[in-house]
Amino acid sequence: MERKEVRILVVDDEPMMTDSLKQNLAEEGFTVDTASNGAQAVELFDGSGHHLVVCDLQLPDKDMNGVDVLRHVKDTHPTTEVIVMTGYGTVERAVEATKAGAFWFLEKPFDFEVLLPLVEKALERRDLVEQTTTMRQRLATRTEYFNIIGSSKEMQTIYETIESVAKSDANVLIVGESGTGKELIANAIHYNSLRAKKPFIKVNCAALPKELIESELFGHTKGAFTGAHADKDGLIQHAEQGSLLLDEIAEMPVELQPKLLRVLQERSYRKLGSERTYPVDFRLITSTNRLPADAIRDGALRDDLFYRISTITIHVPPLRERSEDIQLLAEHFLKMYARKYQRSISGISQTAYQRLFSHTWPGNVRELQNVLERAVLLAKSNKIEPVDLPFDNGSLPEKNAAGANWDVPPNMTLEEIEKFVIERTLQRTGGNKQAAANLLGIYRPRLYSKIKKYKIDIPALTAS
Ligand SMILES: Nc1ncnc2c1ncn2[C@@H]1O[C@H](COP(=O)(O)OP(=O)(O)OP(=O)(O)O)[C@@H](O)[C@H]1O
Ligand SMILES: [Mg+2]
């Protein structure tokens, strides 16, 4: 989640008031502008469309009061919330302000401690309204594509890439950690291509015994080796006019790689034990859960083959780098398994969601899928709760267990402890600040100001 600046406009003709509010709000991480009259407020607001306006009802302008400022704000930026302050507490005015859409009405004098939660609530409401709007726009784009679930920016890019390359015959290499959905992407490419009605042959190079790969792929003639009792077509032949997926390409024996390269260059192949060449026509898709650069460096993947197969490379990011997709995926798997096991489970509790969001998912989507399957089977109510999730003894300690394994070092100041907790939480969320703020139960701007205050290094979102 990128850092988002939250801008607040404070309007009051008493400099004492604007100064102290500005200082207090700035300490909480907000960007604050101040205006001493209505005309100036409107001008500043039109210039930068603040997220929240805190405005006095009584203004020195001849032709404008707080309600007029409020109306202007609501007319031009309906999602901006306005908190109105007054020194008089005149009831009619308050009613008028509420009718005009004020978020809250606050009587002076008040403590900043009273205002701050209102500010946070108002901003939360604004965020919600904005999110629903962007969600709707997103839904209009894509949350799902050929059985692939995900609305993150990363997945949108992948959908676009699939769309633009599927119809060509370009070789595609799919790189991603185990369980990220490489096979689903390969399926989407094949079934979206002109070869969709022809065979789609999948070969897992890691699963086949090394000695067998060659004959499986290329086929053999009778007597080509001991045990070759009859002629046999290879999988390459079976993929004729269709697509061939070579899974875990970096596991293909290095000796065999030049032979595959030749097939790709010459569009023909030779069976084991035969001198005859047969023409072939297939589209090659390969996948690997190793970074190609590493596999090449280690000598597992020949670079000439790599260049040939990676005309188009699709990088599938691990789930921890697209935590926006967790909710959609969790709901998808919940529905799927509730149907499969005929259990009427309608949702996932807030706390269970927090667990899902803070887990780092080393097994990626496959792990999430397994976790949801188990949870659907275990759930005691119609909602999935944290006890139904397997993290209790794992990487995530129970919240209540904190006391048991938490010994506060006697020489740590409260600030040092706070800094430590924030650092650990950010590590846990893989640098995702929104998720960290959720876990810590504080509003995002407050987390930002603490990150700044303690000069905390944020773990990079992209794992190396
Ligand atoms: N974006 C997704 N939407 C829905 N299901 C997904 C998604 N990504 C993965 N899955 C599911 O997770 C499981 C693993 O996906 P898949 O087999 O495609 O991963 P993979 O990257 O090929 O893994 P491996 O490297 O272990 O072969 C499958 O059951 C698949 O349906
Ligand atoms: Mg796979």
Image (cartoon, rainbow, N blue to C red):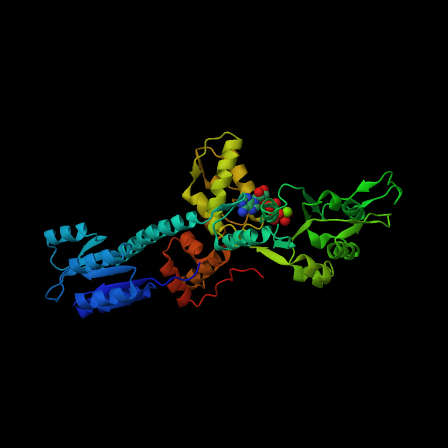
Residue drawn at x 72%, y 53% is 251
Q: Is residue 104 left or right of residue 337?
A: left
Say above or below: 147 vs 85: above
Q: How many marks?
A: 0
Whether residue 137 is visible to the viewer of this picture, yes or no, is yes
Residue 87: x %, y % from top left: 13, 60
Q: Residue furthest top?
A: 342
Residue at left offset 59%, top offset 50%: 166
Left or right of 288, for residue 227 = right
Viewer-proximal residue, 380 or 215?
A: 215
- Quarter of the image with the N terminus is bottom left
Q: Is residue 398 visible?
A: no
Estimate the x, y position of residue 80 in percent, counting from the top left: 28, 57
Give the quadrant of ligand 1. Answer: top right
* Residue 425 image offset from top left, x and y in percent: 47, 56
Q: Residue 77, relative to residue 276: is it above or below?
A: below
- Camera-nearest residue between 170 and 92: 170
Which quadrant is home to the C terminus?
A: bottom right
Q: Nearer the viewer, residue 177 or 108?
A: 177
In screen coordinates, is 159 left or right of 434?
right
Q: Position of residue 435 (x, y in %)?
A: 44, 54
Q: Say which quarter of the image contains residue 172.
A: bottom right
Picture quadrant of residue 26: bottom left
Q: Is residue 424 above or below residue 330?
A: below
In the figure, is residue 263 to the left or right of 186?
Answer: right
